[in-house]
Image (cartoon, rainbow, N blue to C red):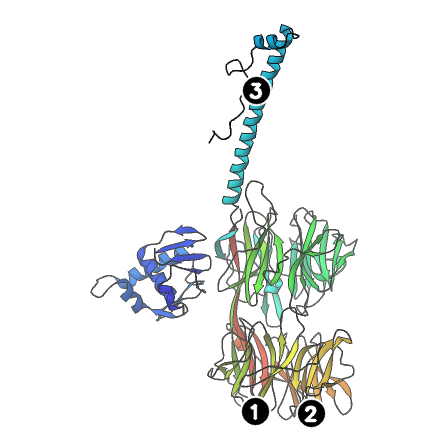
């Protein structure tokens, strides 16, 4: 709820709006919005109870005192309609005011409180016939050697010099006045910041996979929808309407870009998001695709003249001619490049570089021919995560997605300079609201862009092994990743807004914060007795450390030796050692699986364990299960035999979990049509399906993430319920 001081403060702010509660003024980016008394009183009451449900009876008492005879329902609905119109809000897809059926209304957006003489310096006089200057006669008397003609010529030269001085003084004064006027205008009236004028929902699918991006040919937009273990290529009008499935050349086809002449698409065939794809040219009007030479990679982009295509492969940025020839590497970077974009003049390329190791992601620029190397375009690093940029059609602005932790919005950089008005480079935030908006694709004309809007929450569920019944546990909706204690009574999870680690009972009670921002606590694991929690701690720009913390809170204990960087870890059955995927940049630069005794620092690398991740120690202590880096294979290490063996395989496997008796390993394949959980018997290598989530995925769930197995065989799963749709944003880009 908003702090009680809101009722006494002068102004509060939410999104792009500001409310002066004292003077009853609503404004948007400094522009006053006309709003009648009753809608404003409703807004003030909702702001005072931000995040809470304001009952209709409360509104009636606030707007119409006892004894007032009025059509309450009609008047209240009319006032709310006017208020939503002023805020450009939609009752069906609210950003600010949510209708809670049969209860009342709730204000959704974050609300912030705003804390307002001439006598001392005589001028020289110009000589002339009427101002006391020397006459010709006087000159002749003083200078008898002069002839009358020379005296007259000298007097004329003197007058001409005086006139020239007057013209020069006038010109100088005029220039000073003009410069002063320009300077005043330049300082006082800068170029306004870009802003969003209107948002229009284009799709109503909800299951869009934003990884597939948005492509437009001017009349249609194309995108991907995820359905079970495959993806459908969809299309709809740029004005909105029903989405239709597009007949694609491959089962899983990603459409990357359209040529400037609108004749060809660049497409790729994939199985997983991280696949390097053979690139193809596919006619817009349909027909057989044609291989783009030897180009294999992702994120291709056309040059403005349509002759070249730049794309990403591994850690390199490559270019190729549209006929498949002239393939060459432009630049090799230290991180993972993504989503290159050409400037409208074809002189520069901007690209997102994900350094990966410590979470840094930023925008860089290079010349189109690769000379001169790369340099960052936002030296101050704000926002902290930058990605998916593109220029507007006129080249005046560069738009990109900027995130601060889990809050993503659209940003703009001004790339042009005005001599007449002061203009800032930026970056400028374009959006701010409860939904995450990112991956902005400018329309080919005008100032309209298309972007993904994403809103979600997660819930932890369990499947009873005896009845196969699904039930939900009362865990915070912001929980991102959860682990249930061995006795099934307590859950530890990290919170989405700031990444901090929390612990609570499975009924939602007794919440305790275990870590604080900026430290993020990932991959929590309970000790065998449920007394301690092991997790991966990350800070932006720093190596990852494995920490141990008591289940009821307290100080954090670093586990890894100095200089080591850890990905994930698990306890040994006795709780005195851990198995961890880690590396040391100086001595062991490649990730491997190690057995570590934290109290003594003694460690042992398991042989042939390079690039294995998610290690899990069996309850018997004999085996260690892990995944390969591509998440295709589940492998098991036999401590006695000192050897690895493949146990199971799949499309996209998630972290394994052991049964209580150590006889089975449970795992999930996210590319299975039902995102099913399987188990494999270690002794026989027999794989069987344990649970599928088809019914849940047919509802509002976008994905189901296997979170563990209880001692009694209970399956725990984190269900993400969210909606991803495409919006058109009309911008004011001065």
Residue extending furthest left? 67
Which label was assigned to residue 712?
1
Q: Which residue is mark 2?
A: 621
The secondary element bearing badge 1 is classed as loop
Vertical side of 272 occupied by 580: above or below: below
Q: Which residue is mark 3?
A: 163
Sequence-first disc among 2 and 3: 3
- Few, some or many residues within 10 Å of mark 3 (<14, 14–19, 20+): few
Residue 176, position as x, y percentages in the image: 54, 34
**Figure quadrant of the N terminus:** bottom left
In this rendering, is residue 525 above or below 73?
below
Q: Disc 2 or disc 3, which is closer to the eye?
A: 3
Q: x and y percent of residue 284 in the render?
A: 65, 53
Residue at image location 51% in from the left, 37% down from the top: 181
Q: Secondary structure at mark 3?
A: helix
The Cα–Cα distance between marks 1 and 2, rounded to whole angstroms, is 20 Å
Please tell me which residue is depicted at 35% across the width and 69% down the height of the picture. Answer: 54
Asked whether the beta carbons under mark 2 and mark 3 sit within 8 Å of each other, the answer is no
**Disc on the earlier residue, 1 or 2:** 2
Q: Is residue 731 left or right of residue 320?
A: left
């Amino acid at each position: 709820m908003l702090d009680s001081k809101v009722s006494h403060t002068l102004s509060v702010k939410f999104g792009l709006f500001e409310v002066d509660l004292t003077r009853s003024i609503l404004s948007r980016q400094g522009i006053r919005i006309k709003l009648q008394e009753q809608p404003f009183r409703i807004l003030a009451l909702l702001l005072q109870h931000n995040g809470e449900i304001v009952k209709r009876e409360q509104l009636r008492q606030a707007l119409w005192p006892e004894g007032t005879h009025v059509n309450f329902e009609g008047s209240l609905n009319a006032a709310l309609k006017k208020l939503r119109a002023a805020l450009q809000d939609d009752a069906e897809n609210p950003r600010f005011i949510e209708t809670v059926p049969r209860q009342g209304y709730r204000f959704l957006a974050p609300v912030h409180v705003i804390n307002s003489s001439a006598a001392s310096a005589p001028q020289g006089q110009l000589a002339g016939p009427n101002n006391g200057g020397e006459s010709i006669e006087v000159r002749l008397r003083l200078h008898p050697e002069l002839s009358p003609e020379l005296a007259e010529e000298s007097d004329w030269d003197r007058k001409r010099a005086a006139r020239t001085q007057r013209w020069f003084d006038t010109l100088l004064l005029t220039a000073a006045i003009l410069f002063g006027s320009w300077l005043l205008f330049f300082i006082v009236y800068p170029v306004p910041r870009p802003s969003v004028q209107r948002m229009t929902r284009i799709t109503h699918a909800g299951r869009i996979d934003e990884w597939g991006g948005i492509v437009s040919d001017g009349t249609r937009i194309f995108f991907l929808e995820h359905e079970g273990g495959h993806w459908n290529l969809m299309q709809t009008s740029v004005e909105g309407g029903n989405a239709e499935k597009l007949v694609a050349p491959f089962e899983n086809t990603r459409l990357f870009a359209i040529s400037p002449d609108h004749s060809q698409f660049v497409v790729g065939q994939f199985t997983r998001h991280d696949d390097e794809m053979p690139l193809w040219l596919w006619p817009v009007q349909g027909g057989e695709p044609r291989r783009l030479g030897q180009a294999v990679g992702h994120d291709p982009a056309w040059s403005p003249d349509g002759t070249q295509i730049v794309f990403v492969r591994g850690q390199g940025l490559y270019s190729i001619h549209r006929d498949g020839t002239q393939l060459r590497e432009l630049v090799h970077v230290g991180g993972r490049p993504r989503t290159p974009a050409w400037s409208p003049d074809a002189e520069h390329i901007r690209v997102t570089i994900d350094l990966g190791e410590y979470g840094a992601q930023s925008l860089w620029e290079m010349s189109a021919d690769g000379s001169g190397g790369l340099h960052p375009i936002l030296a101050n690093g704000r926002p902290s995560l930058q990605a998916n940029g593109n220029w507007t059609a006129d080249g005046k602005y560069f738009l990109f997605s900027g995130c601060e932790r889990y809050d993503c919005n659209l940003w703009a950089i001004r790339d042009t300079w005005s001599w007449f008005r002061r203009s800032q480079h930026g970056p400028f935030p374009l959006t701010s609201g409860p939904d995450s908006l990112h991956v902005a694709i400018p329309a080919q004309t005008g100032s309209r862009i298309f972007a993904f809007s994403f809103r979600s929450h997660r819930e932890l569920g369990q499947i009873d092994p005896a009845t196969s019944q699904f039930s939900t546990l009362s865990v915070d909706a912001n929980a991102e990743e959860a682990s249930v204690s061995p006795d099934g009574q307590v859950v530890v999870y990290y919170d989405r807004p700031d990444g901090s680690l929390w612990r609570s009972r499975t009924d939602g009670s007794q919440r305790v914060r275990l870590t604080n921002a900026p430290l993020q606590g990932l991959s929590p694991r309970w000790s065998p007795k449920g007394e301690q929690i092991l997790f991966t701690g990350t800070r932006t720009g720093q190596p990852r450390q494995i920490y141990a913390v008591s289940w009821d809170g307290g100080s954090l204990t670093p586990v890894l030796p100095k200089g080591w960087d850890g990905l994930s870890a698990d306890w040994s059955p006795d709780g005195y050692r851990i198995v961890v995927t880690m590396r040391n940049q100086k001595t062991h630069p490649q990730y491997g699986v190690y057995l570590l005794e934290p109290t003594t620092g003694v460690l042992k690398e398991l042989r042939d364990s390079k690039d294995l991740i998610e290690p899990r120690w069996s309850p018997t202590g004999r085996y260690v299960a892990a995944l390969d880096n591509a998440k295709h294979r589940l492998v098991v290490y036999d401590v006695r035999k000192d050897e690895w063996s493949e146990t199971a395989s799949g499309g996209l496997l998630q972290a394994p979990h052991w049964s209580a008796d150590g006889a089975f390993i449970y795992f999930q394949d996210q590319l299975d049509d039902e995102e099913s959980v399987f188990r494999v018997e270690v002794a026989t290598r027999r794989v069987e399906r344990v649970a599928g989530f088809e019914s849940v995925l047919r509802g509002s769930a976008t994905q189901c993430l296997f979170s563990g197995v209880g001692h009694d065989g209970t399956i725990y799963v984190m269900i993400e319920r969210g909606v991803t749709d495409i919006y058109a944003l009309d911008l004011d880009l001065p």
